[in-house]
Amino acid sequence: MFEAAEDPPRPAGEPASRHLAAARQPAPSTPSTAADQPTIAPTSFPEVTIAFLLAQLGQHAADRLTARIAELDLTPPQAGILHAIAGAPGRSQQALSEQLNLLPSRVVAFVDELEKRELLQRRRNPADRRLYALYLTERGEQVMAELAAVAGAHEEELTAGLTDQQRTVLTELLVTVADHQHLQPAGASGYSTLLRTR
């Protein structure tokens, strides 16, 4: 048999109930310190990622290109359409819509404005009189030459910190990334994002 623990002696004059309640309170616990707490490793993220840099540089490049194009009194949609027609004269508005991933109604509106400014012209397609073939005018070709100069200056500005070899390597790497993401790195398709967002 276990013997019950004896209560400590009661001081004279203290009521028995108060003495017993105080005697039977649990001992105060020792406060825990930081050393006693489990260590949780913080989740670490790389400060710079390729995806972040590509997004940052892409936005910067688009903004700078838009500003340069504006100096020619053009918008990115107008420049993109001129570029596409210069690359394939005689294409139809429908083909242009498919290439730039735009609604046909938007392409018609852009073409109307460019034709009004005498930068391009519509001609009846001899193979299908229901379709219009799009061509640059002489003034449109002059503007395209100015756009080419703008694009060259834009390229120089963005890659000013690279050597010729580094530019070549960077181009090859970016083409590989774009191809893996099923993007078209060449031609007028690069204007499609600007066309949809400006």
Image: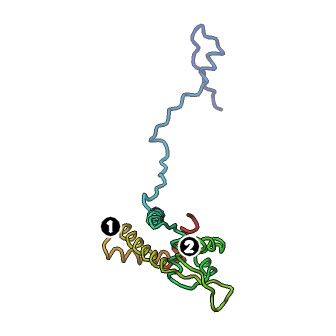
Depth check: 123 or 179 in front? 123
Q: Residues within 10 Å of mark 2 (few under 14, many from 20)?
A: many
Q: What whole-number distance in Å separates the C-alpha atoms at marks 1 and 2?
A: 37 Å
Q: Is residue 157 left or right of residue 56?
A: left
1 and 2 marks in contact (CB < 8 Å): no
User: How many numbered marks are there?
Assistant: 2
The image position of residue 80, as x and y in percent, is 52, 73
* Disc nearest the viewer among 1 and 2: 2
Kindly tell me whether residue 166 is visible in this rendering. yes
The image position of residue 39, as x and y in percent, is 47, 48
Which residue is outermost to the bottom?
Answer: 127
Q: Residues within 10 Å of mark 1 (few under 14, many from 20)?
A: few
Depth check: 105 or 24 in front? 105
Say if 26 sits above or below 180 in the image: above
Q: In percent of the image, x 45 and y 67: which residue is there?
A: 72
The image position of residue 33, as x and y in percent, is 46, 37
Which residue is outermost to the right?
Answer: 130
- What residue is shown with label 2? 114
- What residue is shown with label 1? 161
Depth check: 105 or 155 in front? 105
The image position of residue 58, as x and y in percent, is 47, 65
Kindly tell me whether residue 53 is visible in this rendering. no
Q: Amino acid at mark 1?
A: Gly
Q: Is residue 72 left or right of residue 131?
A: left
Depth check: 139 or 180 in front? 139
Q: Find numbered disc 1 in the image and state the secondary structure of the residue it sits on.
A: loop
Q: Looking at the rendering, which quadrant does residue 110 occupy?
A: bottom right
Q: In percent of the image, x 36 and y 77: which residue is there?
A: 168
Which quadrant: the C terminus? bottom right
Disc 1 or 2, which lies upstream in sequence? 2
Q: In percent of the image, x 64 and y 31: which residue is there?
A: 2
